[in-house]
Amino acid sequence: MMSIDSILNPPNIRSKYILLLVTVFTLLFSACVFAQSRLRNRDFQQPNIVLIMVDDLGYGDLGCYGQTHIKTPNIDRLAKEGVRFTDFYAGSPVCAPSRSVLMTGKHTGHTTVRGNFGKSGVLGLGGGAGRVPLKESDTTVAEVLKDLGYNTAITGKWGLGEPNTSGLPNDQGFDVWFGYLNQRRAHSHFPDYLWKNKRKHIIKLNRNSGKKVFSHSLFTDFAIDYITRNARKRKPFFLYLPYLLPHSAYEMPGINPIYEDRQWSEEAKVYASMVTLIDSDMGRINEVLKKTGILENTLVIFTSDNGAARRWDGIFDSSGYLRGKKRDVYEGGIKVPLIISMPGNVPEGVINNEVSFFGDILPTLSEFAGREPELAGDGVSLKDAILKKMPLPSERILYWEFHEEGGKQAARQGNWKAVRLNVDEKGFHGDLELYNLNDDPKESKDLSKKNPEITGRFLRILDQQHVLSKNYPFLFEETGGQPD
């Protein structure tokens, strides 16, 4: 029988064994700590990706961006658990071109779809100028991720290709697709049909103005089902969820009870209810990510396709302090929220002031998925800015062009931003406006006359960034590239 003394004072051989065991356990513990450290240092495996883009949500419509009347607790919590960008821009001040920039990583001077309507393409529902589809040669973020082994799906509003064109989601990298192809059809939230892959999905209960089935709810149900089914699979997934809300028509199954007694118009109550419904469904998506055990390996991204369609001044102040709204190339038309979260991997509670835009999403997701950032577009990867708070190139150029309301252009470089209105295909250009956004975020003081050198530089930038397009012609004496 072993004595207490022998236990307390073991012979040398026992000491050696104990020392060996301690060493082994120390090494194992260190390996575990190192592995966790590597995870915390962002050398994680391919994450699942859920990209949510809402429609016409203003910069000031969320609580985490200053909203006080509309309740958005789930999105606000997403911002607290991740990174909230203050200087992020959509691809365009309207729907289709903004989505084209998001999908291709090319700004509106280079991307295929530069406006809701072009000179050719498929006739729109109103019988006017055509809807231009993405081309077969376009490379989308879905195709990039699919090549990297991802399952891919989209539900909501596409807007980049009509039936029987090269722009259909299933031909642009998405395995599964459910929603609206045409923007104008998406003006109704109670459609009599949607597209399920390349076939019409008839909704009988909405025929004859039935308004029984709310499309937004179908998209959320689709998203939750897709996440649940793919959480069990070994392959990572990419889910793109371009919601319609809060785009008009301002219609939904019912007003949220918290807004019923407010002294607002009926449309204002519906708008607030739409934004809060988005928020509630963000909570549902977050909950299913938790329940399936993949929350910490899922990159969640939330943004809007352009600025607020209505400013709602004096009620919601949807554009916040910014000048303009949808269809403007001033800040209120193109600056949008961006929130990125991945608990345990993306830093929590960070406010990021780096200047970035939709064109950065493709290279960012490419790098998160394990490939060097795609260099064919106009964006840069935000991965190091998100994970390590690294600065982005300060002198890079962000560019927008808009082919309605007489033609508009804008560019930003550093703190300087230029705006030029009345740009048409005959070569007439309005005067350039110049703003220092650091000193004047409201774009109220035109400094073009006081800074002729900077004004001249931006005039060259605006000319150079537009590559000639037969569908979206701006005419300049000099052009920065070959026609498409």
Image: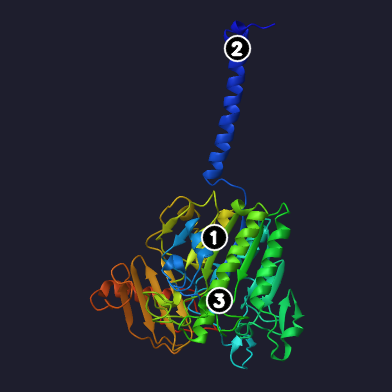
Q: Which amino acid does label 2 sit on?
A: Lys
Could you say where residue 33 lies in the image, as x and y percent from the top left? Answer: 55, 35
Could you say where residue 356 lies in the image, as x and y percent from the top left? Answer: 45, 64
Q: Is mark 2 on a helix, strand or loop?
A: helix
Quick one: label 1, few (<14), some, or many (20+) residues within 10 Å? many
Could you say where residue 134 lies in the image, as x and y percent from the top left? Answer: 62, 75
Reply above or below: 396 against 417: above
Quarter that holds the N terminus: top right
Quick one: label 3, few (<14), some, or many (20+) residues within 10 Å? few
Quick one: label 2, few (<14), some, or many (20+) residues within 10 Å? few
Q: What residue type is labelled 3?
A: Pro
Instruction: Give the mark, 2 or 3, whose residue is nearer the N terminus.
Output: 2
Reply above or below: 119 against 57: below
Reply above or below: 28 against 160: above
Q: What residue type is labelled 1?
A: Pro
Residue at 73%, 54% in the rendered image = 232
Q: Tell me the tag on residue 16.
A: 2
Question: For residue 398, which quarter of the picture?
Answer: bottom left
Q: In the image, 55: left or right of 333?
A: right
Q: Disc 3 vs disc 1: which is toward the camera?
A: 3
Q: Which of 312 and 264 is in front in this view?
A: 264
- Residue identifier under label 3: 257
Q: Nearer the viewer, residue 307 or 264?
A: 264
Q: Disc 1 vs disc 2: which is toward the camera?
A: 2
Q: Is mark 1 on a helix, strand or loop?
A: helix
Instruction: Give the mark, 3 or 1, whose residue is nearer the N terminus.
Output: 3
Q: How far apart are marks 1 and 2 (CA)?
A: 54 Å
Q: Tell me the tag on residue 363.
A: 1
Question: For residue 286, which quarter of the picture?
Answer: bottom right
Farthest residue, direction front:
261
Residue at 70%, 71% in the rendered image = 177
Farthest residue, direction left:
450
